[in-house]
Image (tube, grey):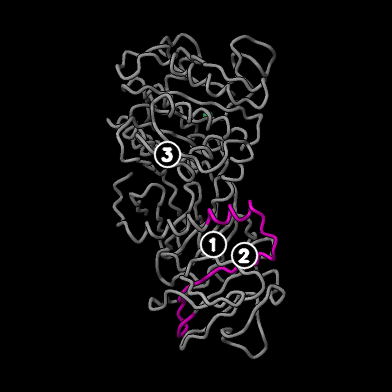
Amino acid sequence: MKSTMCAMWTVMVLLAAGSAQAGLDFTLHKLESGRPGKTLLVVGGIQGDEPGGFTTAALVISHYRITSGSVWVVPNLNFPSIIKNSRGIYGDMNRKFEDLDPSDPEYETISKIKKIITDERVDAIVHLHDGSGFYRPVREDAMRCPERWGQCVVIDEERTSEPRYLELAALADRVVTRVNAGLYDPEHVYHVKNTLTRQKDTVMAKEMAKTLTYYAINNGKPAFGIEASKEFPTALRSYYHLRGVEGFMDELGIGFERRFPLTAEGVDQAANSNVALSFYNNKIFFDLADARSRLGYVPFKKDAAVEYVPSNPLMAVVGGGDAYRIYYGNRNLTALEPAYFEYDDTERDLEIVVDGAARTVPFGRIITVDKSFTVADRGECRVNIIGFSRPGLVNEAGVAVRREDFMDRFSVDKAGRVYRVEVYKQDRFAGMVLVRFDDGLRTAEAADAHGLVLERQANLFERVAAEPATGASR
Ligand SMILES: [Zn+2]
């Protein structure tokens, strides 16, 4: 079961109590500027072992703001295969667009994405892939030849009879020129690859007739593949993908702002700065960028569906029972071992003195501490600072706590800087705040990354609070 907010990137997911079935349906994120212009549909993750493509699509959702026109993004079309790092657990999904038996396990997924492709608001489609070697129109060697797929923009034919864009090749060519303006190495050069699909006179053309892009052009939508080479690490693949996606946005007159520098390093940092998860309307929040492999005794809600909001559409909570495994794409970030509690809904925050300054901190926030913090005592509430203990002390409010007072192994992060402060009221769980010790190590970069998480987090919960679940955007 899953309900989708109309928000740009916020998707709340519900897992049935004690469930083993995660919400692994694909998601559609509509980045609408509210200003007129074309709508570009970006699709990633049709094959689960092509992280360059799906990471790119997720970055467009989390780190771009569209200022004119619209961009719709499906970052995780084959989510179950992404989690398993498999090209396709039910075969190649990108060969299911011509004919498909209704008994195929992916029949519903294909029907849904076809409906999005043919939505009359969609003007053009780019489909992101990671391909082997380097496409070259003339053979140079086994890795650089017409049969390879890396580093090209793919079209099925030179021009269509569709009035929106007759000239597929000309548009692809202009985008290739834009990508080639930012090559790290001349070897990475992009070309247009025309698969001549309509002629159906080669083995490849017959295969390509079964694909998403060919379905799209036969339904009046100009469609393009962007391929980045599997020879590269994911961040470099995404760098080239983003140059291509931005090239299409520029060509279509879609305005955008990007919140990181477009370099391979900028892409890498952006992709790894945004892995946070909120449970139960932000009573629990974890930044999992550097999480330990297991986090114990996490206070989940007793006899209720597990309710979470990921900060990134490639994140999923899988499993149940003794441990919920948290994935970011195909990476297993951590496992949460639940402890089940009734929940208190009367408390929303805690008062805390941080390095001498008093603050009220809503549950679900991370606060930064230099030297020490003290949680204020509040009547019936019991404060449990995980990893801190003092003999005879049950309620840990009113005690000044420093980093060296913690047992490292209880930290949320591997670096031993982030700890949980939990509040209980009459044995009901009321909420959690994370405390992060910076120890003067805060570099400008770390502050930026952290700032982004906090901003995202604030955003996330305003949206959750403001927008009713409608299910309408899927
Ligand atoms: Zn592919």
Q: Is residue 218 above or below residue 445?
A: above
Q: Secondary structure at mark 2?
A: loop
Label of residue 286 in the image: 1
Q: Which residues are magenta?
A: 424-453
Q: Residue at x 43, y 51 (%)?
A: 23
Dots 1, 2 in contact, CB < 8 A? yes
| Location of residue 298 by image quarter | bottom right
Dots 3, 2 in contact, CB < 8 A? no
Closer to the camera, 258 or 471?
258
Instruction: Please report whichever mark, 3 or 2, sits nearer to the chain's N-terminal start.
Output: 3
Instruction: Name which residue type carries label 1.
Output: Phe
For the N terminus, which image quadrant? bottom left
Q: Position of residue 187 (x, y in %)?
A: 67, 20
| Location of residue 323 by image quarter | bottom right
Label of residue 412 in the image: 2
Instruction: Please report whichever mark, 1 or 2, sits nearer to the chain's N-terminal start.
Output: 1
